[in-house]
């Protein structure tokens, strides 16, 4: 398939809305979408499921957090898996964890990440920034960092390697400035990193 034919198909998909399973597989086959490792069983009717990675960090702050002062930002404290390989999320705890998959989008694709109803029904929210910008991870692929919060009064045990969220994909008309070329971006992250907000927020 030529790049012109792909662009036409993506534009047609954009007119219809979200990319469906056939379009997701086609985008991966042409290189517009990078997914490593890829499991075809994770392709859903209108999304690509992503799995929980094997590392996790709890956010630990000792005082007020000034977003412009990196020294006050919460520390990323590694969380160990239990003897059965499970990740325990304590009540009210905020955990950052990467997806198992590294994702790469061309300038012609944009994504939205959402938690699943399976986890929501157990009091677990999977959030962070829902948007995956055109050009994210384009060159080498990058993990998506997920914020996982337990809203129950008891710990919830999660399983690394299991499906944790969905990535919906949409065709775009192409971005003038791909995400990976913006300053202070997370487009080349292969692991969870701390917030870079202090790099572009300044005291008045």
Image: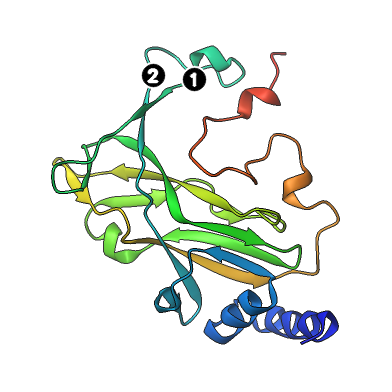
Q: Quadrant of the C terminus?
A: top right
List x then y, in percent, for residue 176.
Answer: 86, 56
> Of helix, strand and loop, which one carries label 1?
loop
**Circle on res. 61:** 2
Q: Residue at x 69, y 57 (%)?
A: 138
Taking 107 as reference, is 56 left or right?
Answer: left
Q: Residues within 10 Å of mark 2 (few under 14, many from 20)?
A: few
> Of helix, strand and loop, which one carries label 2?
loop
Alpha carbon separation for disc pair 2 and 1: 7 Å
Taking 128 as reference, is 151 left or right?
Answer: left
For this rendering, which residue is in front, 188 or 135?
Answer: 188
Q: Quadrant of the N terminus?
A: bottom right
Q: Residue at x 59, y 14 (%)?
A: 69
List x then y, in percent, for residue 73.
Answer: 49, 20
List x then y, in percent, for residue 112.
Answer: 56, 61
Tags 2 and 1 in contact by the CB under 8 Å rule?
yes
The relative height of residue 2 versus residue 103 in the rendered view (above or below) is: below
**Residue 29, picture quadrant:** bottom right
The relative height of residue 166 versus residue 21 in the rendered view (above or below) is: above
The relative height of residue 139 versus residue 116 in the rendered view (above or below) is: above
All told, the count of numbered labels is 2
**Residue 6, picture quadrant:** bottom right
**Location of mark 1 (residue):** 73
């Amino acid at each position: 398939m030529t790049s012109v034919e792909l662009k036409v198909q993506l534009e047609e998909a954009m007119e219809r809305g979200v990319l469906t399973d056939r379009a997701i597989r086609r985008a991966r086959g042409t290189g517009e979408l990078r997914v490593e490792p890829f499991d075809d069983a994770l392709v859903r009717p209108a999304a690509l499921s992503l799995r929980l990675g094997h590392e996790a960090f709890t956010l630990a702050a000792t005082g007020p957090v000034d977003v412009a002062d990196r020294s006050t930002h919460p520390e990323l404290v590694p969380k160990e898996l239990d003897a059965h390989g499970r990740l325990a999320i304590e009540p009210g705890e905020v955990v950052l964890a990467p997806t198992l998959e590294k994702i790469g989008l061309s300038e012609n694709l944009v994504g939205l990440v959402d938690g699943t109803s399976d986890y929501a029904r157990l009091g677990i929210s999977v959030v962070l920034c829902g948007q995956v910008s055109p050009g994210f991870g384009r060159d080498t692929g990058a993990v998506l960092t997920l914020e996982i919060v337990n809203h129950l009064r008891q710990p919830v045990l999660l399983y690394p390697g299991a499906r944790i969220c969905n990535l919906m994909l949409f065709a775009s008309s192409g971005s003038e400035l791909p995400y990976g070329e913006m300053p202070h971006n997370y487009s080349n992250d292969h692991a969870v990193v701390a917030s870079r907000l202090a790099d572009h927020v300044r005291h008045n």
